[in-house]
Image: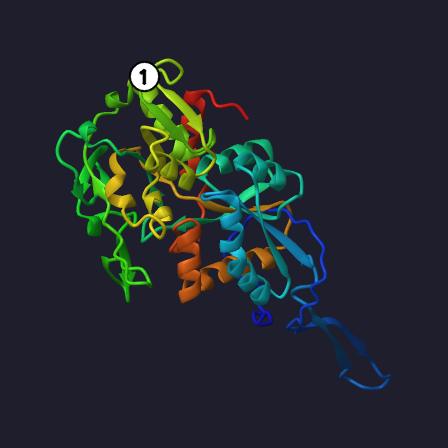
Amino acid sequence: MKLKRIALLAVFALVVAACGGGDANPTTTTATAPVATTTTATPGTTAPSSTTTTTEVDPMADWPDKVIFGFIPSERADKLSDTITPFMEYLSETLGIEVEGVVTADYNGLVVAMGTGGADFGAFGPLGYVQARQQYPSISALAQSIRFGSDLYHGQWFTTDPSICESDPVVGGLENVNGVPTIKPATEVKALQVGWKYNDGVLGPETLEDGTVVEQGLVCNASLDKVKGKTIAFTSATSTSGAVYPQLQLLNLGIDIENDISYEYLGSHDSTVAAVYEGTFDIGLSYDDARRTLRKDKTDVGTKLIVFNITPDIPNDVITANGDLPQSLLDEMYAAIQDYLQTDEGEAVLDEIYGWTDIRPAVESDFDVVREAIDKLGISQ
């Protein structure tokens, strides 16, 4: 599929960077534009004659032949590499240039790649983006993700131990209401809960293709004081929902993570879910609801892992771009991602990758709350 837009879309005014070369040789759409007018006068005549010379303008003339789109592992890297393949194929076909997807080892790997020319676009959590921009000011946010109508999300605390709960666990989800984690029906929370699925726009119980029913996730309320003396699985030190905001919660409660708990960083959200499911850790952290990443292999994950608390709300993930990529390419990339999300394949793939359902233009001031958390925790680059 060749690039069909001939006008430059003015979606954003971002200054971002490009790198890359490749073997793609796309067909372009051209437009005509006047470049010169020559007027001649003949002696004895009263009206001059004029000629206009036109030339064809290639809107892709300043595009690179190849761009690299970097991802951080919300799930095991080898699995994520397979998951992003159809997304990259769609972007390549739509844009008419090669788009290569690369999964870095962690947040820091993508920061370095974006800052040193190893990636042109990147999907970041909010803290990773803020740190990347602090180190490399040329990196800018192109789009912010939307999950089921919301541009905010939160981290979740989960355990296999129901004795931690103040009351019996129930099917539902946790949502911040006036800053207080509150149990609500699964159909009324922002994040799609394990055991639920949209069918023709209607939210209902999820059944796998083989007919197996996915058990619906349980939640309860419990104080974070209960985590003292427990083993805790964080995702990575720079994960906003899987470490930074949860640790800030503990700090605000006077809980010393170095002395009052035992913890490890496991690298990804599905890894913390699996570790607590298997009994390796007492408690785990992830985005809400990362239990879904395990549901196809462990259909009881929603009832075995009980969500008992959540973090304050966090701005959603962003898609970033680097340096001075042409504005026309940025506009077309944004449009292509948004269009892909409207397809059945795109809806399924991006739900599997990060739970995205839409995108909107990013607003830099939305990330001030993340900068404040970085300052309070003293997180270094």
Give the camera-side residue of 312 and 185: 185
- In the current view of this chain or complex, which residue is farthest to the left? 167
How far across and down, in percent of the image, does residue 236 sit? 46, 32
Left or right: residue 58 versus residue 331 is: right
Left or right: residue 240 versus residue 105 is: left
How far across and down, in percent of the image, does residue 65 sit? 69, 59
Give the camera-side residue of 184 and 257: 257
Left or right: residue 174 versus residue 265 is: left
Q: Secondary structure at mark 1?
A: loop
Residue at image x 66%, y 64%? 60
Give the camera-side residue of 377 and 234: 234
- In the current view of this chain or complex, which residue is farthest to the top? 259
Occupied quadrant, residue 112? top right
How far across and down, in percent of the image, does residue 121 sit? 57, 49
Residue at image x 50%, y 49%? 80
| Quarter containing the C terminus | top right
Say whether residue 80 is visible.
yes
Residue position marked by numbered label 1 in the rendering: 255
- Say which amino acid is labelled 1: Ile
Q: How is the image coloured?
A: rainbow
Left or right: residue 36 versus residue 120 is: right
Residue at image x 79%, y 75%? 38
Is residue 209 shown above or below 363?
A: below
